[in-house]
Amino acid sequence: MHTVAWPDGRIVPALGQGSWKMGEDARRRQEEVRALRVGLDLGLSVIDTAEMYAEGGAEEVVAEAIAGQRDKVFLVSKVYPHNASRSRLPMALARSLKRLKTDVLDCYLLHWRGSVPLADTAEVMERMQQAGHIRSWGVSNLDLAEMQRLPGIAGRMIPGSADHAPGCATNQVLLHLGERGVEFDLAPWMAARGMPLMAYSPLGQGAILDHPTLASLATRHNCSTAAIALAWVLSRPGTMAIPKTGTPHRVGDNARALEITLDSTDLSALDTSFPPPRRKRPLAML
Ligand SMILES: NC(=O)c1ccc[n+]([C@@H]2O[C@H](COP(=O)([O-])OP(=O)(O)OC[C@H]3O[C@@H](n4cnc5c(N)ncnc54)[C@H](OP(=O)(O)O)[C@@H]3O)[C@@H](O)[C@H]2O)c1
């Protein structure tokens, strides 16, 4: 199974589950809960959510799915930028914990950069971590220049060393075969610091799944095109993927990616169809 080392030493499966768009339609709720539970049974124990998703509704779907099995889950949620200030951040976390029916998050992320200084957010995150309300914290949608200025990065050069500050654990960014921009500089920079990258929209929100190269590799590996798209993300160093499906029978298709190793011929075919970046581009985000 592909795994990723979290900076605090925990080993987590490299394939998790997203939850954007869950909790928006009451008629789909039980399917969504079931899909997340199927994923947990298949070892997809990282679940990503956010206070933004259905304005807390997705966190409630996740709470129902993980009820009675919180210990099996590596739970990640995200705070709106406008709630990431010294005064509002602890209250936003308290609301998320209540909706998720838990007393601790495994990781809490700043969803994207807003007008609150990153230093303020980082300081409160550190405090909430010390208080035991979150086990780690990170960011999302930050490009390299912002990562380099992020407090808590100092001491990250030598993972495991005595001066290895916990600091920011991860950056969750857009990465799939059709959007490889972060591979130019951000992803290598993170990998060099032992900072796992959480790839969001790893299926390109479904838009890349009909591509003929994916179809041909899917035939070769006897799996779905979704599994190939995800296996490619997992082939990137220190990278995990959080595909979302609210359709229980698709979860197994996605989980297959954990067993697939793409060889150099597969990877060259994918590079030809989906070329890697040749120059710096601003970070793409949804
Ligand atoms: N930090 C951020 O700013 C940010 C931004 C975007 C996303 N995210 C996180 O990343 C997660 C994943 O990204 P995403 O939801 O945007 O896109 P995605 O995971 O790339 O794609 C989701 C779409 O693909 C479909 N799908 C899933 N598995 C499939 C399969 N095996 N075969 C065919 N179609 C399949 C889903 O449909 P069904 O559900 O109908 O099956 C859904 O329409 C989100 O849910 C969220 O947790 C974070």
Image (tube, helix red, strand yellow):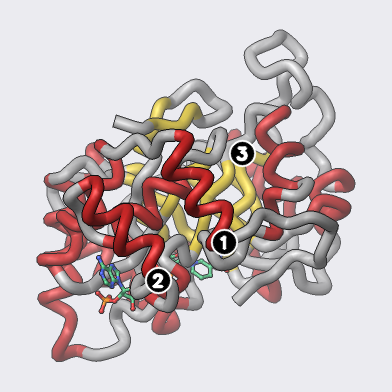
Which residue is the site of mark 1?
Answer: 274
Q: Spatial distance from mark 3 to mark 2, Cα to Cα?
A: 34 Å
Could you tell me if the residues under marks 1 and 2 are in contact, i.e. CB atoms within 8 Å? yes
Examine the rendering and report whether any part of residue 119 can be seen: no
Q: Quadrant of ligand 1?
A: bottom left
- Which mark sits nearer the N-terminus, 3 or 1? 3
Residue at numbered disc 2: 211
Classify 157 as above or below 70: above
The residue where tag 3 is placed is 169
Q: How many marks?
A: 3
Amino acid marked by disc 1: Phe
Image point 43% across, 51% down: which residue? 241
**Mark 1 or mark 2, earlier in chain:** 2
In the image, residue 7 above or below residue 44? above
Tag shown at residue 11: none
Query: Identity of the amino acid at label 3?
Result: Ala
Q: Position of residue 188 (x, y in %)?
A: 71, 38
Residue 105 percent across, percent down from the top left: 43, 47
Q: CA distance from mark 3 to mark 1?
A: 29 Å
Dot in front, 3 or 1:
1
Q: Quadrant of the C terminus?
A: bottom right
User: First in sequence: mark 3 or mark 2?
Assistant: 3
Q: Residues within 10 Å of mark 2 (few under 14, many from 20)?
A: few
In-image side of 51 versus 101 (left or right): right
Compared to residue 30, the image places residue 5 above or below, namely above
